[in-house]
Amino acid sequence: MDLLRFITCGSVDDGKSTLIGRLLYDSDSVSLDVLATLEKRRHASGDVDLALLTDGLKAEREQGITIDVAHKYFTTPRRKFIITDAPGHVQYTRNMVTGASNADLAIVLVDARQGVIEQTRRHTLIASLLGIQHFVLAVNKMDLVGHEEVIFNQIVADYQEIAEQLKLPHVVAIPLSALNGDNVVRRSRQLVWYQGPSLLEHLESVPVPADANPNEPRFQVQYVIRPQTEELPDYRGYAGRIQSGTYHEGDRVRIWPSGLETVIDAIEVSQREVATATAPQAVVLRLRDDVDVSRGDTIVPTTAHPAVTREVEATLCWMHERPLKAGRKLLVQHHSAVVKASVTAIVHKTNVATFDQVGTDTAQLNDIVRVQLKTALPLVVDDYRHNRATGAFILVDEQTGETLAAGLVTETDPELFATPIPAEPAFSI
């Protein structure tokens, strides 16, 4: 059974937590003890407060909003799901970036009374930058606008402009009411003019993305295993997770950034030797030669083509109250690799209202900017569009260890890759 990871995003009070609660409740994915708790905490109308299934923090319950990123898990006969509920407030955009980084699909919630607003554009932009291919425009609270088809069609038309600007590859629009359950798990009799699938039907049928770049294997060393015991005096293994592609016993590989070559002598999965392993398996590689390999190094077949560079152009979502200025020194953490770096230039900022690129010399909290970075040591990276696992990194403050920004590599040699990028959006209702 395959797995779909999706995120719900939208503005405050659009009904994200209620929608997730309805999905869990109507798909019979809520345990009996939780159901008993919900029965004790009903709305004044007598309805169960489904938002309580995701809004767990005390501050969230008091304010009636989502602050932190919440994860929920459920399974239907057709598929497993991991849901990420992202906060809607502008000041928590950084939380939304974190939540969307591993998602395969984004549900963009819109209040039918409000239509498309700036947060709709902001969250769609971030989701598209993070490589999400499938979008659901969920027009919620249709019961509060009389289930009017004309209102839904206008919102769809407004969002289609965004889809065309950002070249979103796959967008499906669904009218629904999370509070009443219309078109969430089952199709609604209140929206007879809508002939498409319910939200859950669509989630169960949408294709799950395969390995982003199966022809470009990547493996970064997280830990060097050297027990040096009497039983294993000469054992040396390199543990980590295969980030993309497949590795085979006997593959000739190159160690980056040193460039040394050797051969994979054995592959271990759960302390058992296997002939092959593929992403995203956690493995231990044993190499034939006694070469110098450290935490953060990347092991790839000699036929692979990663970018090994000290100069990177990247898109950042700035996550710190202190503004970013060109010349600032910081750390780049690329999975296990941590190197010193400096921001040599801020190329431009993206206006979330218009998607225009405007000049700037600083990046404020939640700004999305393109920057140029120079690192003290080479990084082994890929263009994020072609490999999400190896094209992402974070910026860290040297002194405090605080996370400053989430970054996506945007400049490597495009001729080395063959993954197509859709040119036109596919929009359906």
Image (cartoon, rainbow, N blue to C red):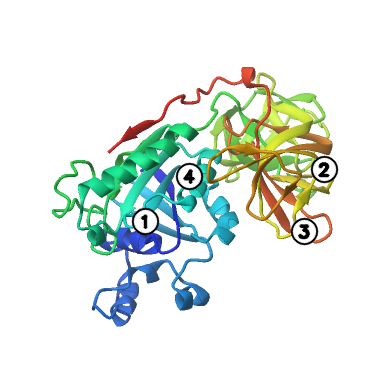
Number of residues whose C-alpha sits closer than 10 Å to that of mark 4, classed few (under 14), some (14–19) or many (20 or more)? many
Upstream in sequence: badge 1 or badge 3? 1
Place residue 243 in its image quadrant.
top right
Upstream in sequence: badge 1 or badge 2? 1
The residue indicated by pointer 3 is 401
Q: How many marks?
A: 4
- Distance between the alpha carbons at the discs numbered 1 and 3: 40 Å
Q: Secondary structure at mark 1?
A: loop
Q: Nearer the viewer, mark 4 or mark 2?
A: 4
Q: Amino acid at mark 2?
A: Ala
Residue 406: image location, x then y, percent: 65, 48
Q: Nearer the viewer, mark 1 or mark 2?
A: 1
In this rendering, position of residue 383 left or right of residue 186 = right
Task: Judge whether 108 appears above or below 346 on screen.
Answer: below
Q: Secondary structure at mark 2?
A: strand
As drawn, the label of residue 124 is: 4
Number of residues whose C-alpha sits closer than 10 Å to that of mark 1, classed few (under 14), some (14–19) or many (20 or more)? few
Residue 211: image location, x then y, percent: 50, 33
Upstream in sequence: badge 4 or badge 2? 4
Depth check: 282 or 208 in front? 208
Q: Amino acid at mark 1?
A: Gln
The residue indicated by pointer 2 is 341
Q: Contact (CB < 8 A) between labels 3 and 4?
A: no
- Distance between the alpha carbons at the discs numbered 1 and 2: 43 Å
Q: Nearer the viewer, mark 3 or mark 4?
A: 4
- Distance between the alpha carbons at the discs numbered 3 and 2: 14 Å
Q: Secondary structure at mark 3?
A: loop
Q: Amino acid at mark 3?
A: Gly
Upstream in sequence: badge 4 or badge 1? 1
